[in-house]
C-alpha cells in the first residue's frame, strides 16, 4: 500500500518534534508537509527548528519547507500539536477542507462529534465519525491530555472488572509536558510547582468522557467523580499519578494487579505498528514505577502500574506512570491514526 | 534564669546539626554534651562532623568532645535524633536514668505513656507525664514524623471548626528527610521515588494519635481514617502534602482558609522563643506553596497552606508545606522543650 | 543624614528584586521610585511584579507605582538593571538629566569615562568622574559582569603580591545569572550548557579594565591575557570559577592563600554598610567552595577561594565562588553607591 | 566461531551492569560467569543485583549465580570493574591463573607491562603483551579513567597533526562516574562539588601514557604537561571536558575541526562490533556538545567535540564530551577485547 502522507501542524514544538521522530521510518505514514507559527515559516525545517531531542533530526524532514498551518497542505492527513489558542479554529478549517485531523490539542476534545480516543479503551467511540462518512468532509479525532491517557488506561480494566465509583488522582508531572521553553529552570530547581493551568479540569472531565458510553450519537460521561491535584516536578519526561479508587465491588489488590496485567485491546488484537505488546505493565517492587526507569517501557507506549494496595479511605490505590510525550501525546495520536487506517477511516486521498 | 544544659544524641547527623544550629544563642538552652555513633567518638565535634548546612559550625560547639550516647552525660536534658534502630533502648536508658528526653525518633512515639506533641495542637497531652512527676525518673516526649507535623497542624483547625471524617494525603518529600547520605543522586536526578519506608504507616497512625483525646491516662486516637501515599522528589528541604479531607459539616473553602489563618495555640499565647507568630500561613496565589519559596516562612516554624478548594470526591482539598528539618524535626523538638519549660516540666537539674 | 532616594530601573527583574530586597532597611538609601518595561507600568509594584525570592516582598515598596524608565523620576540616584538592549540609551539619558547612575548593565562598562568599579580593587578609578564634578551633569558607574567580579577580586591580591602574566578561567555559572525566565528547565535538567552569550568576551575584557591603571583620565587595561570558557550548570545561585594563573614570580601555594586571606580594601577600611568583614574567605577543605554551602558567606558579599595549588601548565590554580546576584550584581552596585557616598560623589539632591 | 565466554568481576555495580547490558547479544562474547563482593554471592544475579539501568535486566544473566571474584571461573576472559581497593591483587591472581583480564579499574593502568589502551589511539601498545605469549600466563589490558578516554581521543589527531606542547583540562563530570550509591543527592542538588578523589592525577598521568611511545618494551610518556581540574555536576551520564591546548605549530581552528572529523583508527578499519563509525563527531552549534543531547552519539561510543576556537592564553580550545559508563568504562573494555580478538590475543580457551 502506498504510504499515507502526513502534514504536521506545530512541527517545531516539543510534541511536533516527537511526531517527526516517531514517524521516521513508519510503515504506513510519510511526512510530506510541516507547518508552524509565523517565526518559523518559509525556512527548511532544519533552519526553522532547534532540535531538542537526543539524536539527530531525521534526514528526510530536514529540507521540507515550513509552511503556514492553513489548508491546503500537500498531505492526506494532518497531525496537530498546535498551541491551544490556535488549534481550535485551524483544526476546524482543516476538517472543513476535507482533511482528517489527528489532534493532540485540547480545543475539540469535549466536542460532541469528536472522539476522544484511546484505542485500547474506547475504540468504539470512532463510530461518532460515521456521520461524516461519504460527505467529503474531514473529521477531527483527539487524543487525551497527557496525564489523562495514563489514568484512563489504568482505570479501564477496573471499570470493566470491578466497577468504579470514585477516583482521586494526584499527579507528579514532567517538564516536557509544558512544551518549550515551558517551565523556567529557576522555578523548578530545588522546587515543586503545585499548579498546572487547566490540568486538573482536563483530567476530571476527559477521563469521564473516555470511559463513558455511546448513547445515540454522542458520549454520556462515566458517572463516577474524578478529582485531580496536579504538580510539576523536576523530571524531564514521564508523568506519575498516585491514584485512589473506590470500586463497586470488593476485590483483593492481587485481583486488580491481575486485571491490569491481563488488559489488552484492539491495537494489540490488530497488531497496530505502534501498539505495545502489553499496554499496562505491572511491577512488584515496592519503589516502582519511577519516571527515569520506566518511562521508556514498550518504547514509551506502555504505562507501568505499581504499588497496588488497599487504601483506608477509598478502598484501593496504585501508581501509574507513562511517557508523556509518547503515549501521552505524539505516540497517542499516531496510534489513533493507525486504528483509523485499520478500520477504514483513513487512506491515501488519491 | 540559668540556661538549661542540653545533650544532643546523634549530633553529627542531618537533624543533629540542625539542633546545634538552632540552639546556638538560644535564650533558654545551652549545648553542653554531644553524642554520636562509634565512628565519631572521642573527637572534638569539628573533627567528628562534616558540617553540611550553609554557614559555619557554631563556634561554641566546635571543641565539645563527641561521646557515646549513654548516660550519664553532662546535661539537664537530652535531645535525640538517633537512628531508629538505636533510639528505642538508648532513649529508654536515659529516661530511666532521670533525664528528660526530647526525641525526634520514631521508636517511642506510639507508646501509651509518651506524648506525641505539637504544642499548638495537643499541649494537653503533656499531662501524660504527670505519672512520672516526683518519681525521680525522667520521661520521653516525642515530636511527630516530619510529614505528619505539617498535616496534623493543618488539620487541627478543621477538626476544631468543622469535624473531620476522612483524610487522604499524597506527599512530595524533600531529600533532607532521608538524612545523610540518604538518597543516592543517581536515584533521584530526573526522577521521583514513589516510596519511603514506613512513612505512610507513620503518617496514618501518628496523625490520629496527635488529634486524639486524652482518656484516663492514655490517648484514644481520632476516629477518622487517614490514607497516605508518599513520594521522594528532587528538593533539598521542604515537604509538600496534597490533602483531601471529608468534613463533618458543609463549609465554604473560604471558611477553611479563615480557620487556617486564625489558628493559634499555646506557643503563641506563651510567646515561646521558637514559636512562629502564626503557625499556619495562607497563600492565595494559585501556584503556592512551593518548597523553595515557602519553606523558610516563620524561620522554618510556620507551615504554609494554599489552593484551598472544593474536591469532587472528598469534599475539600488543600496543600500544606513546611520545613522538614526545622518544623518537621529539630525545631519541633525544641518547641516541645520550650513548652516543657513554660509548664514546669523541665528545669536545670541542680 | 537624610536618606538618599533611590530609583530602580528594571525593578521587576531578577536583579531588580534583589535591589529591592537588599535596600529594604538600608541605613543610607530609601527606594522611592520603580521603573520597568511597558507591561509592568502604571501598576503598584505588588501587582506588576511576581516576587521570586524566598520571603515576602518588602512592605514599603508594595504600593509604589511602576513607571517608565525615563527621567525625571522622584529620586536622587538610579540603580539600573535594565536589559542590555535598553540600558545603553536609557542610562545615558538619566546621566544627561543629572542623575548619578549605578548600573549593573553591560552597555557602558567599557566606556572610557565610566568607572568599572569593585570598591576593594580599584576605588581610585572613581577619579574618572572628576571631570563631571560641578557640571550639573550626572554620571554612570558600573559594576562588572557577575563572573568577572569574583575573578577580579581573587586576582587583585595576586596582582599586588606576585604579578600576574596570564589567567585561564573556566566557569560553572548559576541559573539566576540568566535572569527570569532565563534558562528553560528542559535545557538544563540532567545537563550542562557550555555556552553563555557574550560572557567569555566580557570576562576577558572587563577583568583587564578593572585591574588596569589610570593613565591621564582613562584606564589602560592590565597587560596580561585572560581566557574564559563559560558553562551554565544546574545551580540556582552561585558562580564558581576554576582559575589557572601564571605569576610573575615564584610562589608557594601557601603564599597565595595568605595573600587571599589578608586581602582587604577601602570598603573594609571605611566600614561601608554592605562591605563584608573579609572580601575573600579561604577554605582549606579539599572539596570547597561549593555553591550551595558558600554562596551566602558574608551575606553574599564575600567570595570564597579554595583548592589553591600548583598547576603543571600555568604554575598555580585555585577556585573562587561568589553569589552572582548579590556580590555579582545588586550588592555590587549598592557597595559602589556606598563608596560614592563615602567619597562625596553622591548625596541627597536637595 | 564459538563465542568467547566472559566472566564479569564486580557484576552488580554501575559498570558491571553496563557490561551485562552491552554484552547481551554480542556477536563474539557470551557472559557465563558473574562475580561480586561478599554480600551478593551465592544468589542468582536477579536476586543479588538491583538493576538500575532503564529497561530490564537481560534474561540470559538473571539466573547466573554470583560467585566470589577468584579464579577459577567458568570463562575464557574476565572483565573487571572491581572497586580500586580490591582490583589490584584480584586481577593479578586471575592473570597468574592464565586468564586474560580486561580491566576498568585503575590499579594496574600505570604498570609497565600493562597496555593502557584506546584502540583508535594506541593499538600498537598491545605489543607490550608479546612477552606473555606462549607462556600460559594470562595478561591484563586496561582502559583509561572515564574522563581520560574522552580527552586522549580528542588529543590524538592534534598530536598527530600539529604536535601538542601543553594541555589544560577542566572537567564537568556526571554522577554515574562515582558508581552507586556514589554521590549523595544532598551534596549535589543545587550544587557543584569541585573535587573528585584522585581524578586529576589520573587524567594527568594516564593521558601521557596513552599518547606516549613504545620504547624497548615499555611506554615513554608523552612529554607535554597535562593539567586537570575536576568537578562533579548534577548530570546522570556524560562527562564534559573544557580543553585548552598549546600546539607545536600554528593552525587555524578550522584545521583542528577537520582533523577531529577525519580521525579514524584500527577499530574502524577492522569494523570491530562496538566501534562507532566515527570516533569523534564535530558539532558546529555554539552551545554543543551537551551531556543529555550528545552522550548517546554512536551508541555511546563516539565522543563529540565542539566550540573549537582560538584561546588567548594557550592558543586553542575546544570541548569534548562522551558517555562515561559506555565509552568511558564498559564499552571501552569491550572495544579493547574486540581488538584483542581481531589481533589474535584472545580466543576461546579450549
Image: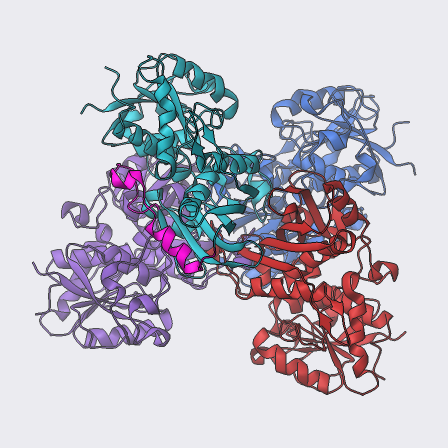
Chain colours: A cyan, B red, C blue, D purple
Q: Is residue A204 left or right of residue C54?
A: left
Image quadrant containing the N terminus of chain B: bottom right
Q: Is residue B220 left or right of residue A222?
A: right
Q: Residue at x 72, y 65 (%)?
A: B212
**Image position, residue D235 (x, y; %):** 45, 50
Number of marks in the rendered image? 0
Where in the figure is residue D298, as x and y percent of width and height? Answer: 27, 44
Q: Residue at left 61%, top 44%? A: C152
- Look at the picture and state if D68 lies above or below C234: below
Q: Using the image as rendered, state which of residue A20 and residue C25 is in the foreground.
A: A20
Percent x, y of residue A11: 39, 25
**Quadrant of residue D256 in the image?**
top left
Q: Quadrant of the C terminus of chain B?
A: bottom right
Residue A251 lies in magenta, yes or no? yes
Instruction: Judge by depth and name the residue closer to the eye, D134 or C247.
Output: D134
Q: Is residue A88 above or below residue A299?
A: above
Examine the image and state in which quarter residue D37 appears: bottom left
Residue range of the region highlighted in magenta in the rendering = A250-279
Q: Image point 32% across, 61% down: which residue?
A: D17
Residue C21 appears in the rendering:
yes
One can see residue D235 in this view:
no
> Is C243 located above or below residue A328 in the figure?
below
In depth, the one of B244 and C315 nearer the eye is B244
Q: In this orientation, which residue lies closer to the viewer: C319 or D58?
A: D58
In percent of the image, x 59 and y 61: which residue is there? B177
In the picture provided, is B199 more to the left or to the right than A148? right
x, y percent for residue B109: 66, 72
Amino acid at each position: 500500500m502506498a504510504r499515507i502522507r502526513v502534514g504536521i501542524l506545530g512541527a517545531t514544538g516539543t510534541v511536533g518534534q516527537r511526531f517527526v521522530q516517531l514517524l521516521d521510518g513508519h510503515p504506513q505514514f510519510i511526512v510530506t508537509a510541516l507547518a508552524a507559527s509565523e517565526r518559523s515559516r518559509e525556512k527548511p525545517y532544519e533552519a526553522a527548528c532547534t532540535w531538542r531531542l537526543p539524536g539527530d533530526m531525521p534526514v528526510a524532514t530536514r529540507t521540507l519547507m515550513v509552511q503556514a498551518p492553513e489548508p491546503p497542505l500537500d498531505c492526506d492527513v494532518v497531525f496537530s500539536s498546535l498551541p491551544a489558542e490556535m488549534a481550535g479554529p485551524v483544526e476546524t478549517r482543516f476538517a472543513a477542507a476535507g482533511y482528517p485531523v489527528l489532534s493532540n490539542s485540547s480545543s475539540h476534545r469535549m466536542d460532541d462529534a469528536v472522539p476522544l480516543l484511546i484505542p485500547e479503551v474506547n475504540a468504539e467511540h470512532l463510530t461518532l465519525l460515521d456521520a461524516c462518512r461519504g460527505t467529503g468532509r474531514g473529521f477531527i479525532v483527539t487524543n487525551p491530555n497527557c496525564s489523562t491517557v495514563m489514568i484512563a488506561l489504568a482505570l479501564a480494566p477496573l471499570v470493566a472488572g470491578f466497577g468504579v465509583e470514585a477516583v482521586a488522582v494526584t499527579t507528579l508531572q514532567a517538564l516536557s509536558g509544558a512544551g518549550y521553553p515551558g517551565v523556567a529552570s529557576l522555578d523548578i530547581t530545588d522546587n515543586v510547582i503545585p499548579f498546572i493551568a487547566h490540568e486538573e479540569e482536563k483530567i476530571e472531565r476527559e477521563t469521564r468522557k473516555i470511559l463513558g458510553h455511546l448513547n445515540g450519537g454522542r458520549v454520556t460521561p462515566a458517572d463516577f467523580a474524578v478529582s485531580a491535584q496536579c504538580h510539576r516536578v523536576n523530571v524531564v519526561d514521564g508523568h506519575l499519578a498516585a491514584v485512589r479508587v473506590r470500586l463497586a465491588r470488593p476485590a483483593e489488590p492481587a485481583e486488580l494487579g491481575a486485571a491490569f496485567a491481563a488488559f489488552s485491546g484492539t491495537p494489540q488484537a490488530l497488531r497496530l505498528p505502534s501498539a505495545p505488546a502489553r499496554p499496562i505493565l505491572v511491577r512488584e517492587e515496592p519503589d516502582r514505577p519511577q519516571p527515569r526507569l520506566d518511562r521508556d517501557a514498550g518504547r514509551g507506549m506502555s504505562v507501568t502500574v505499581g504499588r497496588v494496595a488497599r487504601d483506608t479511605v477509598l478502598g484501593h490505590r496504585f501508581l501509574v506512570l507513562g511517557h508523556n510525550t509518547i503515549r501521552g501525546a505524539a505516540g497517542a495520536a499516531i496510534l489513533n491514526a493507525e486504528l483509523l487506517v485499520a478500520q477504514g477511516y483513513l487512506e491515501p486521498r488519491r
